[in-house]
Amino acid sequence: MSIEINLKNTKTRLVDRLEPRIPAHVSLSLCGPSVYDRAHIGNARSAVAFDQLFRLLRHVYGADNVTFVRNFTDVDDKINARAAETGRPINDITAETSQWYLDDMGALGVLEPTHMPRATQYIAEMVAFIEDLIEKGFAYANEGHVLFRVRAYDDYGKLSGRSVDDMIAGARVEVAPYKEDPMDFVLWKPSTPDIPGWHSPWGRGRPGWHIECSAMSHAILGEAFDIHAGGSDLMFPHHENEVAQSCAAGHDFARYWLHNEMLQVEGKKMSKSLGNFFTIRDLLDEGVPGEVIRMVFLGTHYGKPMDWTDKKREEAEKTLRKWYAAAVPGEDVPWPVVSALADDINTHGALTAMYQLDGADLGAALSLMGLWDGTVPAWAVSDDVDLSAFADRLASAREAAMASKDFSAVDAMKAALIEAGVEVRMSKQGVDLVPGPGFDAAKLEGV
């Protein structure tokens, strides 16, 4: 059965059928983190939402036919500020925080992308990109800065649906003597001796944020690719500026734009002043399993505002315990689950369909949703698992073996129990069986 994927395209304001530029191969770019601190739960929503898209694309097109780029912004004024605050080398900070991000997202079942470029690896490409924009008349250099001429690009504002004049009236734009127009944005800026900088035709400096993402996607995916994704807070100015500079350079850039909505906590905007600001690591350290966090995220469509609540967390944990007890590994994902995901990544619909499943169907669906690797996680193993019958059988087999000196039956049963994730403890006092971290009750059926 062929699967048609439809996505809500910010660019067209319509739900468009996905038609890859290269037949049977999909390219996807996601704006990654600026690595100066731990990822908070709002950052993680975007990662989880578009990891689910990545998983769906791999399921439909095959893992080798999906190219996913998620970058690391390791040139950023917030990173410079953190280095100044702590006295630590910038490279140490970005290396540490990048690994934090990978570890925390991995705990949520987020797959590593095909490519994870770092901005510092593509400075030469950024300089070349800027030189091209200057040559074409879309950018100009002044006082060590290079800026993009917003009014020179006629389609500026189409992605976010704003006019330039409206943006000037409603935005906090920087008025600076080196700007021809307040709306012009920075492509390159000078660096003082105490912050990172690279030699360029305009002096020692560093790239602006927007050019970093365009240059990296262009270097890896080429002049045109299929899907660009990110949080709705990035639509303007970041994504608008990406479109402007890339299209002005003559690149087709992205055909489909996807934006996830923002996250609240217990009905309120997440804020340190309200005491409801927390990171993914905070939740994990409090004992909230990564699978539960992911399940809560997937319970709301990515295009709708999401509310993190303790009630949702508790319900997600309860449901996952039930599902893990009923699931066995499977490969054929039931159509209702795939169909829901193909309908603009409708994760809520996919989860709803899963309430009707069990066995291999449920196991395959859980795997596609990034919620299961085939073994029951330690936190989901019930404390009241009754293994006494297996312990009695093993003890009897062991007693018989002591008399016959044939331990083959004991060894076979012990191996089967271990394979099911059971810790087998045998001593003179008897046999004790304990569910281990990888306990899988379904594997006990043949023991």
Image (tube, rainbow, N blue to C red):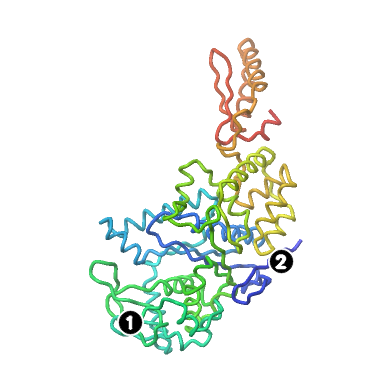
Q: What label does residue 254 carry, if any?
A: none
- Within the image, what quadrant is residue 436 found in? top right
Q: Are marks 2 and 1 in contact (CB under 8 Å)?
A: no
Q: Nearer the viewer, residue 58 or 70?
A: 70
Residue denoted by label 1? 176
**Image point (59%, 76%), residue name:** 11
Amino acid carrying label 2: it is: Glu
| In-front residue for pair 174/93 | 174
User: Which residue does the image show at 24% across and 66% down from the upper left?
Assistant: 194
- Who comes first in sequence, dot 2 or dot 1? 2
- Residue 252 drawn at (x, y percent): 55, 80
Which dot, 2 or 1, sits closer to the camera? 1
State the residue lying farthest toward the left: 193
Amino acid of disc 1: Ala
Query: Where is the C terminus found, in terms of image quarters?
Result: top right
Q: Is residue 355 left or right of residue 181?
A: right
Q: What residue is disc 2 on? A: 4
Residue placed most toward the observer, 415 or 45: 45
In the displayed structure image, the side of residue 273 where residue 92 appears, left or right:
left
